[in-house]
Amino acid sequence: MRPIALFFRLFVWFSWRHFMKHRVRALIVVAGIALGASVFTSVRLSVHASLNSFTKSIDLITGRSDAVLSLPGGRVPEDLLPAVLQQPEVSHASALMTTYVKAAGDEMEPFLLIGFDPLSDRPFRDWEAQRGTAGSDSPWLGLMADPFTVLLSEPLARRHGWQAGDNLTLAHDRDHAIFRVLGILKPEGLGLAEGGRVALTDVATFQEFSGLHGVVDRIDLKLTAAVSPVSLEELGRQWADLLPEGLQITSPSEAGESGRSMIRAYQLNLSILSFASLFVGMFLVYSLVALNAASRRHELAVMRATGASPGLVFALFLTEGVLLGAGGWLAAIPLSGLLVSYMLRGVSQTISTLFVRVHVDTVFLQPWEVLLSFGVTLLISLLAAVQPAREAMLVEAGEALTTARLQRSRKDSAGKMAGVSLALIGAAVPLSRLPAVAGIPLAGYVAILSLFVGFAMLAPWGLQRFGATVSPMLNRLAGVPATLAGRYVRDSGTRTAISVGALITAVSLFTALVIMVHSFRETVQLWVHQTVSGDLFVAGKLSAVNHFRDPAPERLRKGLLRLTASVEPVRSRRFGLKTGNFDYELDLLDLGSFLRHGRFVWVDGNPKALQSRLIDGEGVLISEVFANRTGLEVGDRYVAQVEHFAVELPVLGIVRDYRTRGGVVFYDRAAFTMRYADPSWSTVRLFFRQRPEDFDAALTALRREIIDRCGSHLEMVAGEELRAAILRIFDETFTVTFVLLLIALSIAALGITTTLAVQVLERLPQFNTMIAVGAAVEQVRSMVFWEALLLITAGEIAGLMCGFLLSYLLIYVVNVQSFGWSFIYSVNWKALAASLPLIVGTALLAALPAIRLIFRQPPAILLRDR
Amino acid sequence: MTDGNFLIQAHQLTRIYPMGRTDVIGINRLDLEIAPGELVVIKGNSGSGKSTLLSLLAGLDRPTGGGLTVAGVDLAAATESLLTRYRRSVIGMVFQNFNLLPTLTVMENACLPALLAGTAYEQVAGKAVDLLRWLGLEHRKDHLPSQLSGGELQRTAIARALINQPQIILADEPTGNLDSRNGKAVVELLAGLNRDRQRTVIIATHSNLADPHATCMIHLKDGEIAGRA
Ligand SMILES: Nc1ncnc2c1ncn2[C@@H]1O[C@H](COP(=O)(O)OP(=O)(O)OP(=O)(O)O)[C@@H](O)[C@H]1O
Ligand SMILES: [Mg+2]
């Protein structure tokens, strides 16, 4: 106990009081860490909330079933239910149907309508109506007894102001109908699914409403004995006679697995990005602790001379780092509270557009996440303090006896460090070739880290070379102050250089993200204009939210047959399928017509040679994401169960596709009809055969004609609008990224402020000497300004180089391994050219406080300095 | 009193450091005249105001009261840029702890004031080499301060003080960090400058090393002149 008490006493005497004396510096560092830690925490909490809500929703809808009967891409015949119930292995079974619906005349978000048999569903899912809202004691009886009644979840009812007894008109893709609100659900069980935006109705009503007679989406089963996936397969074989062709028995645990893994990958990527902020903050801690170690050498020598062990000195400085980290983390708590609400919106929106629909309103403080952020922040600060603490530890007691305060000549370690850093940078190449581990681009992340550390370690050598190169030029260009500045940059050694690391990291992150987002956007734009081509898109109402799973209503299909000859339709049917745990779409479309007007963005395969083979239905095209997820290549065979058909076709080519989730297989619709059956179509895009002179008028006329022929129960969107909307959503998706980036840059600016201020404070006697021997104040200021400019320029050049390497890693390794897609590499020179001077400018602004520090005291202080 | 006869003229010169509620006296109502070519030794206990006086003379600080004219420059009223020019051309300074810039070599340290004044390196280099040779430092000219002994450091500082050929050399405790042999050598150098090159030299010191060379001794006490000989 005694040694610990002693240590803390010494810490207070030696370190804490020093901190208090130089409060501002310590506070800036704490602020930097706090910013980093709060970004890290709030990002993780937000994604976690999305993941949680998604999982919870899936689990609530899945309920307590042991197995699920479904038909890939289609529906299950209802009469299977009694047959299955008779099997000895089955104790309970319940049919379920879901679709997204909208309240008529209401532009609010669609919500999920669940159709089920309230009686047989009891063992599977929990829900209860609020007292007094459901009329009778047993609302489930009411649902069954009265057709076209619904129970609404509480948030949904509150949002729309609906109450028990109200009548509402609900619309889905084929029709609309009036429902009576039977009651409001308690906020528990099913009442919480989809973020509390659900309505329950009887399955018979559902079928009546949707026109899906005799079929259900799936049948959930409870089995008599505990069943593992292996025995589920066995069960499938046993029931071979009972089950129609194509029907599958799967484990409910697979539900949502692909969505979950996508969200996890996104969480990991955002975590890494926000970790960068902490990483930049690390340089702040390093700067301050290193300053304390260097400026207090004499004190340290005296401490050592009076009996302090090297270990004690080491521990003192390490504790300084930990204290800064802990302080930053504490300050991060209120900051995270502010940030998290913003992040939550941005993050859940991104997840909803890119991966799966999520509804998140609240964040729960995950103890584990809080602990993680505490641990990471502390660890980072501790690591940052190690090197300065080691330097402090090596101060010899003998130095106490020297009065002249001259730096000992340092051994030149820059060259050695450069060797190590080149090795680290080089290591990124083999690392980037390694495959993902469990879908996580682990090696890719390590490669990024080794790039960052490598470039930060290259800084001392780089500055030496840079300073040596520019200082002769500066002499001619800008006179003595600039030359001296160049000299300082050349000789300032490891500490200054490593502080430039913060800038290098931030600039490289900036560069890489600008390049990545630009490449992503350019590629998506190309894809949107070629593959999402079309002048008008038409589908049944709510068809899009329901993933175009059902054929378009008959009136629409018939009406379109008689459409004016000036437009060419490209009809398409999409099936939501699964391979392993990966959800994807099979998109059957009129390839002949499509290829006359639009194009695919090819990754692999020869577009010219394949055109006719594609149209003839000789094989499929797969999206890049699908290829990366399944490992299929050109020439392999694509195998799938689609409704009742076992489809097996060769893969002819790989194309880019960036729709939600991104896994797509394209095949010709007519060929599918010939080989298997007419899949009908769920959506159609129309191309004008020749671009009309007055395009807008022609489009308006076309819209009118469609409504005349097909009625108004449909959704139409002009191609231009759709494409613009996709790009807009895309841009919104990256606001979170840029907010994170901005924060990293701000922390880097704080880093510049502290680094330069520290350097100025340390060298005040030198500046005063310069004044005493005849320098003008402006000359000293201009020297410090040039120092800042040179350091910033060097940091920016290195950051730029690191950023280009990083952008390759992000586009070709991290994105491919995390999400399965890559982009066409394209550098946004304009944005880079415009923003880099801006960063230099900001960095120089950040240097101002340091320059202002210089002559706060008259130079006569020099004569009192000993 | 004819101005032209004196290089340095102080009248009721005062420098008070306001320290919160109380004022600390550095120099108090000091009257002083020094003719060109003198070697003045300023003595006095610690805290008596020696450094304060030197920093006022050097143009590193401004008086809070009274007047101070050095080489025709009214230091109390001078603008910042005039002060800078004054420091460059009139004054050369030597410090107790040498104050050399650690990243500059001996040669570069010596040249620095001339470079700051706008002279090209090529022009000043020859003169610096001459100075360093005279000071016995020629073989050390490319070394960094960290590689030098105390005596060598102080001689480098003297070279730096002389490079702009100032009229006045101010030395604050120049021997304080040196052993007696090196201290003596430095004092002799300063005395030589005074004798052979007609520089006005002002040394503030506790030691008696400079006494034999002094043309004038000033004793300070509590910021005032307690005696002059
Ligand atoms: N910057 C300052 N702020 C406050 N007081 C000061 C300052 N500089 C000097 N003093 C005070 O002015 C008085 C004269 O100080 P000065 O340094 O001139 O003495 P000195 O004769 O040079 O002493 P020493 O022989 O110890 O060098 C002292 O009381 C000192 O505390
Ligand atoms: Mg003194």
Image (cartoon, rainbow, N blue to C red):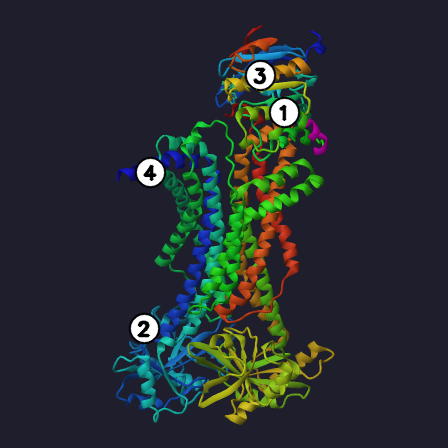
Helix, strand or loop status at disc 3: helix
Say whether residue A105 is magenta. Answer: no
Q: Which residue is mark 1?
A: B159
Q: Is residue B123 magenta?
A: yes
Give the percent coordinates (x, y) of residue A483: 65, 38
Image quadrant in which the C terminus of chain B is located:
top right
Q: CA distance from mark 4 to mark 1?
A: 49 Å
Classify residue A317 by image quadrant: top left
Q: Are marks 3 and 2 in contact (CB under 8 Å)?
A: no
Residue A128, label in figure: 2
Q: Which residue is mark 3?
A: B187
- Label 2 residue SS: loop
Q: Residue at x 45, y 38 (%)?
A: A293
Q: Nearer the viewer, mark 4 or mark 3?
A: 3
User: At label 2, which amino acid type do we have?
Assistant: Glu
Q: Position of residue B6 (x, y in %)?
A: 68, 11
Q: Please give the residue where the numbered disc 4 appears in the rendered image.
A: A8
Q: Chain of mark 4?
A: A
Is label 1 in a helix, a strand or a loop?
helix
Q: Determine if marks 4 and 1 fall on one subunit.
A: no
Q: CA distance from mark 3 to mark 2?
A: 101 Å
Using a 10 Å C-alpha cutoff, classify the residue at mark 4 as few (fewer than 14 neighbours), some (14 to 19) or many (20 or more). Answer: some
